[in-house]
Amino acid sequence: MDAALLDALPLFGPNPQVLAEFEMKEQWGNGYWGEVTVTAPGKDGAANWSLTLYLPKGWTVSRSWGAMVSEGARPGSLRVQPEAGTGIIPARGQITWGMVVNKDEAHQTIEKDLARLAPIPGTTNPPGPFAPRYMGFNMGSWWKGIFGSDKAITALTELAESNANAVAIVPTQYIKDIHASRIFRNQQTETDENVRTMIRKAKDLGLIVMLKPQVHLEDFGPHQLIVPDELDTFFADFETVMVHYATMAAEEGVELMSLTGELVGLTRPANRDRWLKVIAAVRAVYPGKLTYSANWGEELQVPFWDALDYIGVDMYAPITKGNDPTLAEAVAGWNRDPTNSVTAEVWSGLPITEAMRRLSIHEDKKILFTEIGYRSIDGGGTGLGDSAREVTVDLAEQALLYEAVFTAMTEVRADWLEGIFFWDWDPEPYKGVDQIPNVDDFDVAGKPAMEVAKTWFSILGEDSTPQ
């Protein structure tokens, strides 16, 4: 094991109910992942167990499964709580949960290029109004046959009725694990015909289309950690996949294309030439606008923005610290010095909107929020995403966080922001007994957040049509 990682292994505070033992599974330059076995050694077992976790300064848990990890009561500590169904451990029984730990020089192994956030002389002129050209939602499929279905066509029609003027169509291909090198289709990958059906329907509805093909792990693990053993093999496959979808985009008159996204481990400066080769091959067949959808914070390390038309950011940065924030608190999470420690670390203490403004000026490119969204749960603005399972539904908080996005951008006159694609609008939403689609997820269809977006899309719409 790397000597530096030895010092970064987790320590657990004493707990009379349970014992915790960590086993590392894989490691890389600035991080590792592993599993924690929690055992109840006593005759009475353990109910509603919890753990206090300590990591050295500069290291953070970027993802967990099987348990929820949050800020602890003591400085420098983290609190581990069970997910639903794992809170009771029988006598001498055990449960296992996992986590990814990364060096917190930035979010998920991101090495910051702080020069991109330095003040730019001669840029004190008042900004123009917030008038994004593109306003809409992402619509993705992770199972063949969803795109093109009657439900998907209905969902797309309802999306167009939200006053959105754009949609990102998101097909997915896969890679076996974080060190694999071959990209492939499987039973989950949508057919080209189905993708084309969605593009054509969107255009018939008057929507601007961004085609946003993704490369994900086959087991839906953290694709941000993909670092193939054979980089040249991976990038050869990647170029083939991107050119394939770029050809489709050209044939269908698609206005925007994102060259996948959140491949944090692959956008290091050392890979610039590989990316430039892919971009050149795509431009040879596709005349539209190009971007890449960087994980929030990753945008600081991407070495090829100069070869693209837009800076793309999947903006999931935490903007609040707890449940039920006020609108003023949520807006301050965008436009004031960040109170969330992770957000403060990523952008060196700058407000998010100021960091984005400076990046836009530095790269001389407008920014697209290629993804942005919040689950309809308590604490939706704190960064709780897929890792949180035991949650309290809070439709009003999701709506407030949507309101905060538009209010914050209007307040700072964010003329650097060319488009917003919210995550997400499900093509086949699950409706429970309450008939609310995906009641505790990111989806906004049928929720109060949709009405917020619809109102703001209407207000901004007159100044938002692409030229």
Image (spheres, rainbow, N blue to C red):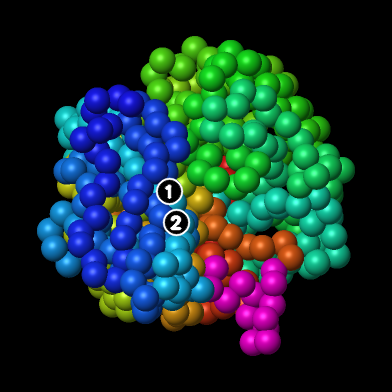
Asked if residue 351 lies in the magenta stretch, the reply is no
Magenta stretch in the rendered image: 429-441
- Compared with 210, 154 (above or below) is below
- Which residue is at a point 38% across and 60% down the rendered structure image? 38
Could you say which is closer to the camera, residue 214 or residue 211?
A: 214
Numbered badge on residue 429 = none
The residue pinned by badge 1 equals 35
Residue 50 in the image: x percent, y percent?
31, 69
Q: Amino acid at mark 1?
A: Glu
Q: Secondary structure at mark 2?
A: strand
- Compared with 116, 15 (above or below) is below
Displayed quadrant of residue 380 = bottom left
Residue 181 appears in view: yes
Q: Residue furthest left?
A: 75
The residue pinned by badge 2 equals 97
Q: Amino acid at mark 2?
A: Trp
